[in-house]
């Protein structure tokens, strides 16, 4: 797999995790 810089992916992952955590509460 080619290692390409994907800052958007990191941000998206963080947002998704944050939203998921918030939704669970």
Image (cartoon, rainbow, N blue to C red):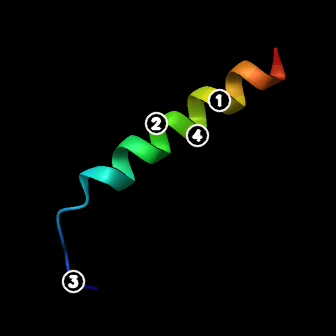
Q: Residue 25: image x %, image y %?
A: 82, 13
Side (left or right) of 22 relative to 10 = right
Residue matched to label 3: 2
At horizontal 70% and vertical 32% (from top left) the residue drawn is 20
Crowd band around label 3 with a 10 angstrom C-alpha radius: few (<14), some (14–19), many (20+):
few
Q: Which mark is residue 19?
A: 1
- Where's residue 9, x and y in %? 37, 55
Numbered marks: total = 4
Q: Are marks 2 and 4 in contact (CB under 8 Å)?
A: yes
The correct choice, above or below, for 8 with respect to 18 in the image is below
Residue shown at the point (58%, 40%) measured from the top left: 16
Could you tell which of marks 3 and 1 lies nearer the N-terminus? 3
* Horizontal relation, residue 25 to residue 21: left or right: right
Say what secondary structure mark 4 lies in.
helix
Q: Earlier in the sequence, mark 1 or mark 2?
A: 2
Query: Which label was assigned to residue 16?
Result: 4
The answer to whether marks 3 and 1 mark residues whose Cβ atoms lie closer than 8 Å is no
Pair 3/1: label in front = 1
Give the Cα distance between marks 3 and 4. 24 Å
Q: Residue furthest top?
A: 25
The residue shown at (17%, 63%) is: 5
Give yes or no for contact between labels 1 and 4 (Cβ–Cβ under 8 Å). Answer: yes
Check the image and report above or below for 1 versus 8: below
Question: Quick check: 21 left or right of 3?
Answer: right
Residue 14 marker: 2
Q: Please, what secondary structure does the residue beneath circle 2 have?
A: helix
Give the spatial CA distance, label 2 vs label 3: 22 Å
10 to 14, vertically: above or below: below
Q: Position of residue 1 (x, y in %)?
A: 28, 86
């Amino acid at each position: 797999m080619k290692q390409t810089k994907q800052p958007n992916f990191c941000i998206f992952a963080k947002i998704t995790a944050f939203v998921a955590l918030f939704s669970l509460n």
